[in-house]
Amino acid sequence: MNNNKRAGLLGRPHPLERKARRELGRERRADVALDAHAAVPQASDRGDAIGILTAQDALRLPELVPIRHGRMSASPFTFYRGGAAIMAADLAATPTTDIIVQLCGDAHLSNFGLFNGPDRRLVFDLNDFDETHPGPFEWDVKRLAASVAIAGRNNGLAQEKIDRAVRASVKAYRTTISELSNLGPLAVHYRRLEIERVIEMIGSHKQRVRVEKLSTKASGKNHLRALDKLTAVIDGRRVIVADPPLITRVDDQLAEQIPMVIEFFDRYLATLPEYRRRLLERYALVDIARKAVGVGSVGTRCFIVLLESGDGEPLFIQFKEATASVLEAHAGASQFEPGQRVVVGQRLMQTTGDILLGWSHYEHPDSEDREYFYFRQLWDGKGSIAIDLMGGTELRRYARFCGSALALAHARAGDASMIAGYLGKTDAFDRAIAEFSLAYARLNDLDHAAHADAIASGQILAERDI
């Protein structure tokens, strides 16, 4: 039966069968051949990378901007982590398939990790969605693969080992997408990469032990641990301890923000289902502080909120400023306000999400300006792997996990059958992306050196804090 003639109860046609969608993907190769993805922009044709970075500074807290540049300057890999806007401009100049998915927008190695699902089981997945936005699937794949190449170079690995790790990430993406393309939408929705599966996929006993230790550490990274690390009892009251400029207490220096917090906290609650709102009603807001986080995110407004139940059980929530995705300048404006964009993208892509994920905005009383935020739990079983300590085998296996997790995210939020049809069954795409990644690592080295020169000349102020 022709799918176009099959109608559902509401008279809408059924989606095309998998076979037809795969064929549509295969036909895209006529416009963008697989080997075309090896291309990177010529250095002379690129925009001003340092100008792109400093343009972002205008939207950030001035006192934290030097810390952002200090963290980015530490190595080519940390520079790459903070340079999503630079790569977005570069990707827009490469051949694109126009096979659209919900993109992470910043799918580098350090933006994958462990966290607790609602059932308190650890899963491995993407864990940063500040730049999420619809776009061509290969942009995320290139961002991930280039991060593997840059991390390998940063760790002093031989080129052969770097190439194997990059190809492992892309092959894992391609083969996982192929597998998922044979499953129904609901089966894809329920699929997730649990920590037990990660341990099972690891070859050596030594590495299994290391990951088991990491999972134990992640499980212990909870609200009670945050309470011990971030707070103290002062004059009989539990408060967040200041550590300026990284942690600044609201009632010490940011008292003018308190009305904003109360107002948009209510807006946040309105984005949650009723049963989640009732859960939060069992807690009272105790303290608030501003906290600098990440590398590229430093300078955006980020706060941590301590809540307590009637018996003193803690709950930490982080609310973080959301701005336009770096992809929007190249892929079109989002249909959502920035905080909602992050939340919708995360819910689309993650296999299992934070039960308290929501968004809000604050309207300045004396102007038409708005500030946008999204909310999530702080330290809810989160764990990350130290990329800079990885040898060749570890990097290759970790890159493979990341490639599989990215494919699952794209399958949840896009058309796995069309992507699988485009990629085919050979390693042609793997080889092209490996070539792209090596070339892009060289461009990143040039940008990192230019950033260092700008710091040395005083054009950019930088402060090392870690």
Image (cartoon, rainbow, N blue to C red):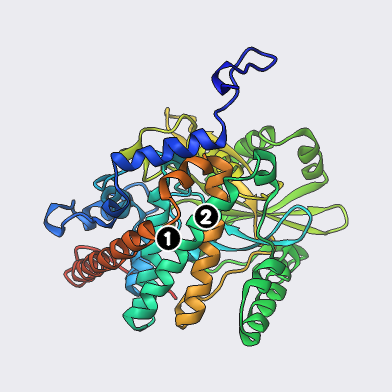
Q: Locate the C terminus and report the quarter of the image it occupies.
A: bottom left
Which one is nearer the viewer's eye here, 232 or 217?
A: 217
Q: Are marks 2 and 1 in contact (CB under 8 Å)?
A: yes
Residue 142: horizontal and vertical position, in percent?
37, 56
Taking the spot 79% from the left edge, 55% from the top edge, the residue there is 119
Residue at (56%, 45%) from the top-left corner? Answer: 411
Residue 125 appears in the picture as rendered: yes
Q: Quadrant of the N terminus?
A: top right
Q: Which residue reaches farthest front? A: 1
433 versus 280 height, above or below: below
Q: Residue under label 2, please give it.
A: 406
Structural crowding at the residue carrying mark 2, measured as other residues with C-alpha within 10 Å and reported as few (<14), some (14–19) or many (≥20) = many
Q: Which mark is residue 5?
A: none
Residue farthest to the left, as pictured:
44
**Residue 171: x and y, percent?**
46, 62
Q: Amino acid at mark 1?
A: Leu
Q: How far is mark 2 from mark 1, CA to CA?
A: 9 Å
Residue plotted at (51% across, 79% down): 394
Q: Which mark is residue 144?
A: 1
Residue farthest along the top direction in this orientation = 11
